[in-house]
Amino acid sequence: MNCHYCGARVREGAKFCTRCGAPLPRSPEDLASSGYQSVLRPPPVVEAEAPYTPPPGWRTESYPPATMFPPLFGVSGQERSIGWALLLTLITCGAYGVIWLYKMGRDIRRLSPEDEPHPIVDVLLTLATCGVWGVYLGYKYPSLINGVKRRLRLPTSELPVICLLLALFSYGFPPLVLVAMALVQNELNKLWQALRRQGFWEQR
């Protein structure tokens, strides 16, 4: 037999190796306890652990992810009549449109988890740039609405691109701005309705 430490040849029945002095196992049980393993024998197969099973009566239903919770608890909003908003904007020669833009920005800010938009700044920049900043808002406001919808796992839309194109072409045909604002307000109304159905807020 061979020493399992240094590999030297030793006689059968020897208790210690004559080269390194290591104790020699004398039985299969001693071999197992000494940690000896033949290089010709594959390592033992370790049985895989059984999958964890909860104890009887344990509740295992899955809970909704964090993104399913409302962005702001207790937030309140108001659905607006698009027809009345358009009519007031036309009667006041666009003056109410400025107020309408501010109200939409305020509602989006209430819903958005980000610290935007800034409705007062947006209104002032839109007036100061003669509507150029409004082209940017035509893309930004619907994008923020889509962000809120994604957070609530609601289907999004291609409204940012549509409103951006309407705002760009409004320089040749100004009423297209009102169409873009009506589309944004419609998305906001749908969002308030979805939040009310899910119990996130109560209409006052």
Image: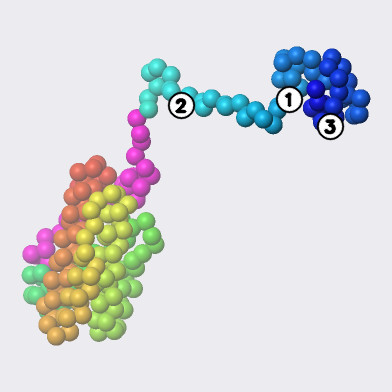
Q: Amino acid at mark 1?
A: Gly
The residue to which callout 1 is attached is: 35
- Examine the rendered structure and indicate whether residue 143 appears above or below residue 92: above
Q: Which mark is residue 51?
A: 2
Distance of mark 3 from mark 1, alpha carbons?
14 Å
Residue 67, horizontal then vertical, whole percent: 35, 47
Indicate left or right for 48 with 189 as reference. Answer: right
Asked if the residue at tag 2 contacts the one at tag 3, i.e. Cβ–Cβ closer than 8 Å, the answer is no
Chain part drawn in magenta: 61-85
- Residue matched to label 3: 6
Q: Residues within 10 Å of mark 3 (few under 14, many from 20)?
A: few
**The N terminus appears in which quarter of the rendering?**
top right
Left or right of 130 in this view: 90? left
* Amino acid type shown at disc 3: Cys
C-alpha distance separating marks 1 and 2: 29 Å
Residue displayed at 24% across by 57% down: 156
| Residue 119 in the image, given as x and y percentages of width and height | 30, 68
